[in-house]
Image (cartoon, rainbow, N blue to C red):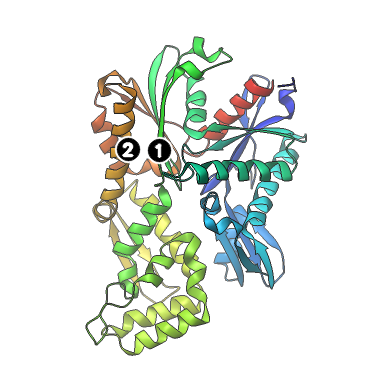
Amino acid sequence: MPHVSSARACGLDFGTSNSTVGCVRPGRETLLPLEEGKVTLPSVVFFNADDGRTYFGRAALQEYLSGYDGRLMRSMKSLLGSRLLDGRTEVHGRSLLFRDLLSQFIGELKQRADRQGGRSFEHVVLGRPVYFVDDDQVADRMAETTLGEIARSVGFKEVSFQFEPIAAAFHYETEIDREELVLVVDIGGGTSDFSLVRLSPQRAARPDRREDLLANGGVHIGGTDFDRLFSLASVMPLFGFRSLLKSQREIPSRIYYDLATWHSINAAYTYRVLSEQKRFALDSQEPEKTARLLGLIEKRAGHWLANEVEQAKIALSDQPHTTLVLDRIEAGLQRQLSRDEFDAATSALVGKIEAKLAELLRDAGVAPERIDTIFFTGGASGVPQLRRRIAAMLPQARPVEGDLFGSIGAGLAIEAARRYG
């Protein structure tokens, strides 16, 4: 690899929910402010049909939630490795490839990073989950290849990758003064990833860290999956989920799953779906609930509702109860939500994460009591039930919380300086 200046190198964490870009400046790694002085840019794009402009991040969410007509795109990372990637969506009356949507967002990340960094970054270490796609090596390789092609298309000359939990480990390593065997638990918006790593100040100076990486593993479960199951269990019943028609059949559930899943919400807004739901409303045993569903569709408020559910999930990480206020759908409509409800709705997901973690330790031949530290990162790692159950698996380990949204980007910046410095 030719020698290049680390001044032109950066680490880029393209996340399901949030993205960051970091670089190394004299003394330490730095995450660059990407929006409103904040180092995270929510991975959201809004195509405003009223003014014809494209908005990114918090501005995109604000435009959408303010009621402007248009298309909101979120959870875009989930397109990588999927059949949808080569598909199209309609934006401003024209057909847009999903691949080009990803290029627009990553290009925007680079432009903002270049502006804030005062230079044009040419070399990048991109974060990637341990598995973009579970149990499909071909699709997983294609996802990485596609992301690399997109990065080059927006102006990066040299592109390489690092597993996201390993990047987080390298960031944690800057904070310790002794050797530790660390399990990194990275629960992001779309994936749960684990790395078992030996870390120490002395090891940090080594150019080749392969022998320090004992095991990697992961499963395609993340924060958006928690949101979906919570919505289906506690919110969608307000709109007729599991309600009966007069024929004693349940109302078909497809629309509720679409409305509870960020990247499927737009599928609920077609004329065919609206006509179908109007027919079901006439035959419903609970017409007040199906009337709410029709109002939700007609107001195109699905992303708004999904955002409210996500905020409720976040609130329940810090308190046992919260109130979901749905005045936008129906005056006075509220739903009291509890952490116990959330835990019940998502317990099976946590169980799958536990099973994958146990498999990783078993395959690595590492007894749980040997692990010194559990390093939590990723926004969804703040779920109390998840932390509690993982900590119970490793009773001797000290739990440490990293920067839930910044550890990976900072670690990728360290890796970029190491590779390109």
- In terms of sequence position, does the residue under pointer 2 or pointer 1 come before the other? 1
> Whole-percent x and y of residue 358?
28, 33
315 left or right of 61 in image: left
- For disc 2, the marked residue is 356
4 left or right of 290 in image: right
Q: Is residue 109 above or below residue 400?
A: below
Q: Quadrant of residue 44?
A: bottom right
Neighbourhood count class around disc 1 (C-alpha, 10 Å): few under 14, some 14–19, many 20 upward: many
20 left or right of 199 in image: right
Residue situated in front as seen by the camera: 365 or 178: 365
27 left or right of 279 in image: right
Q: Residue furthest bottom?
A: 282
Neighbourhood count class around disc 2 (C-alpha, 10 Å): few under 14, some 14–19, many 20 upward: some
Please count the marks in the image: 2
Name which residue type carries label 2.
Lys
Name which residue type carries label 1.
Gly
Which residue is drawn at the image coordinates 46% and 17% (left, top)? 212
Q: Residue furthest top?
A: 202
Which residue is drawn at the image coordinates 64% and 54% (left, top)? 99
- For disc 1, the marked residue is 218
